Image (cartoon, helix red, strand yellow):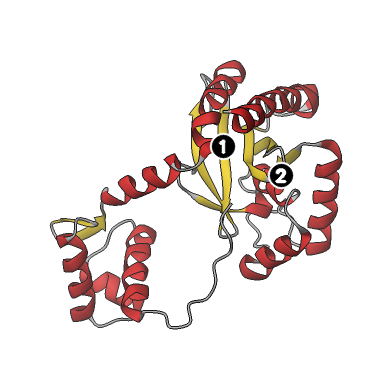
Amino acid sequence: MAGLGRRAKNPVKTTQTTLRVVEALKELDGAGVTELADHLDLPKSSVHNYLSTLEQEEYVTKDGNTYRVGLRFLDLGSYARHTMPVYEVAKPEVRSLAEETGELANLLVEDHGRGVYIHREAGADAVRVDCYTGVRVYLHSTAMGKAILAHLPESRVHEILDRHGLPEKTEQTITERDALFEELSEIRKRGVAFDREERLSGLRCVAVPILSNSSRVEGALSVSGPTSRMQGERFESELPERLRSAANVIELNITYS
């Protein structure tokens, strides 16, 4: 589980700017030198130099006058994912959940106070949502994120909230710290977390934590689907029970593999 990250005593500004350039290319879904310079409030000549260097090192591609994030980052991300024991152990269970429920099954871990989807499997009836492997989300607005927060030390949760806040994603998002801590207490009691359209309108999610034998939270597992199918007994008891069973298998395999 990654920490929030300490502030560097002597940050290298060129490195910071390079990363800002990459993040901006992602945010803008590709851009030319002028658009990127305006977006970052940097001289065009400087932006061109950063882009040229990134292209030379194969981290950025150029199509006409448009620069985009390159696939070299996929290599790094995939490597990082494979270093996490929970990923390989959980994959078969995520696949089984998707096949059995017909919905979208997900595996999420916490990284620097945000949630990162590291594996997803789509069942036959799964809806397509704005979430892909690698995307980062706010922990308080997802069932998996809340399942993780519920099993972190309270001081760590406060650190995360101090850094990232409680931004409102929909009208259902919890945006008050006291209300969130009440919810986390309930999650610990019942062993399951719910997302009732808190990140995306029309989408509900059920999640459970994945815990090590020392009660350290390794990640969370979920099934998500449209509100029309995620209600009643299926939402409140059937899916939670299936998720608990899957998480138990993963926890045993992490412990004894």
Percent position (x, y) of residue 72?
A: 26, 50
| Few, some or many residues within 10 Å of mark 2 (<14, 14–19, 20+) | many
Up/down of 49 relative to 56, above or below: below
The residue carrying pointer 1 sits among few (fewer than 14), some (14 to 19) or many (20 or more) residues within 10 Å by Cα, namely many
- Judged left or right of residue 77, residue 239 is right
Picture quadrant where residue 40 is located: bottom left
Question: Label 1 sits on what residue type?
Answer: Leu
Rendered residue at 36%/79% (across/down): 12
Which amino acid type is shown beneath numbered disc 2?
Ala
**CB-based contact (under 8 Å), mark 1 and mark 2:** no
* Residue 215 image label: none
In the rendered structure, the answer to whether residue 31 lies left or right of residue 251 reads left
Task: Provide residue 10's location: percent of width, then percent of height.
Answer: 43, 83
Rendering quarter of residue 203: top right
- Residue at label 1? 107
Separation of marks 1 and 2 at Cα, in angstroms: 12 Å
Residue at the (41%, 80%) spot, across then down: 11
Q: Tell me the residue at 54%/72% (across/down).
A: 6
Query: Does residue 128 appear in this view?
Result: no
Most extreme residue toward the top is: 100
* Residue 119 horizontal/vertical position (percent): 49, 36
Q: Secondary structure at mark 1?
A: strand
Q: Which residue is mark 2?
A: 147
Q: Is residue 233 left or right of residue 53?
A: right
Query: Does residue 215 appear in this view?
Result: yes
- Helix, strand, or loop for circle 2? helix
**Residue 147 point in image, percent of width and height:** 71, 44
> Foreground: 34 or 13?
13
What is the tally of numbered marks visible in this picture? Answer: 2
Q: Which residue occupies the extreme front position in the image?
A: 256
